[in-house]
Image (tube, rainbow, N blue to C red):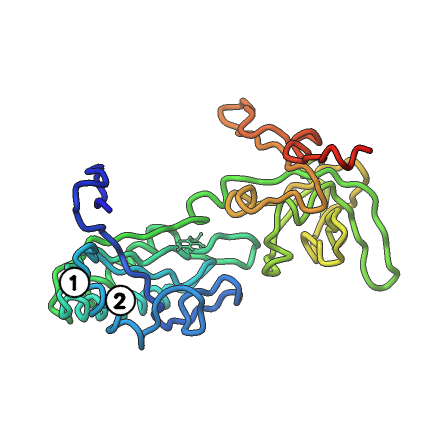
Amino acid sequence: QGGQGGQGSDSQLPTRIMLRLTPGIDCHTHDYIRTGHLDSKFGFDPDQIEAVFAFIGQQPNLTCVGLHAHIGSQIFERQPHQDLAEVMVQWMEKAKSYGLPVTELNLGGGLGIRYTESDDPPSIDEWVQALCQAVKAACESQNLPLPKLLCEPGRSLIGTACVTAYTIGSSKTVPEIRTYVAIDGGMSDNPRPITYQSLYRAVVANKMSAPVSETVTIAGKHCESGDILIKEASLPQTEPGDILVVMGTGAYNYSMASNYNRLPRPAAVVVANQEAKMLLRRETYQDLIRQDCLPDSLLG
Ligand SMILES: Cc1ncc(COP(=O)(O)O)c(C=O)c1O
């Protein structure tokens, strides 16, 4: 196999790789979006790493140019990434001792965003500064040259750029327990709440100046009791036809959306300079059955 850079497959250049390591760092986020702790399916464990370095160092077709880790998502503290920088710089030194020409360090993503009022993430600037300072300090103490530092932020770049609009339908009050308010979407357009109990904030777009008067449970339209988009939404009095807008749906919504219950995915519209333009067209029922085949033998 040829290396990167367009040389083609007959150039016999070694393939440039980075190794993903599991640094054994815990962070305070949901279990399903923690990836850097020891009991993780991702990356090589600390007790495997030296054997991997030795193995890679003997492969003429591989050049290990750097190390990589991603410890999880929706992280608000700076400490886990600072600890990560320190651990990874130590592993870079170890990799060099096995003759690996590592010059790049990728610390993954994970910077959280503000889904609800109590979320308090650092800014991108603060996060990047904390990472850079930690890498610099670790390199100084190990006497290593500074690596090319990479990171892979996801939601922090785009999460707050989008909202999702739903139409409110019927409601049901279970006396002394809760009021369910139904919407025309749910876990198929936003699988995060059912997957990792993610919290969201919503407003009623056509009643922005109305006072908040009730706490309701926003129920999705799928055949799962767990399809609850927001367990406790503080809203003005709602009625069928109101438009419920859920904030912070720019990341991991459309990319994780599905046709659960064979529901078509909604449209996406970009709004800029007082103009609205179609970004993704709404799926039709025809789209849903596009791949269906009916063998002649079943037609009778
Ligand atoms: C390897 C890797 N890097 C970066 C990210 C982005 O994470 P986030 O959106 O939390 O910044 C992910 C998300 O799953 C990931 O798996």
Residue sitting at x 42%, y 45%: 157
Mark 2 and 1 residues: CB-CB less than 8 Å, in contact? no
Provide the residue designation for mark 1. 100
* Residue 34, horizontal then vertical, whole percent: 47, 65
Provide the residue designation for mark 2. 88
> Which residue occupies the foreground of this view, 170 or 144?
144
Q: Distance between the residues labelled 2 and 1?
A: 14 Å
* Residue 41, horizontal then vertical, whole percent: 44, 66
Q: What element carries label 2?
A: helix
As drawn, 124 above or below 296: below
The C terminus - image quarter: top right
* Residue 86, horizontal then vertical, whole percent: 26, 69
* Residue 18, horizontal then vertical, whole percent: 27, 56
Q: Quadrant of ligand 1?
A: bottom left
Residue sitting at x 81%, y 59%: 178
The three-letter code of the residue at mark 1 reads: Leu
> Which residue occupies the foreground of this view, 218 or 283?
283
**Occupied quadrant, residue 75:** bottom left
The three-letter code of the residue at mark 2 reads: Met
- Name the front one of labels 2 and 1: 1
Say whether residue 65 is left or right of residue 272: left
Residue 225 is labelled as none
Say whether residue 180 is left or right of residue 138: right
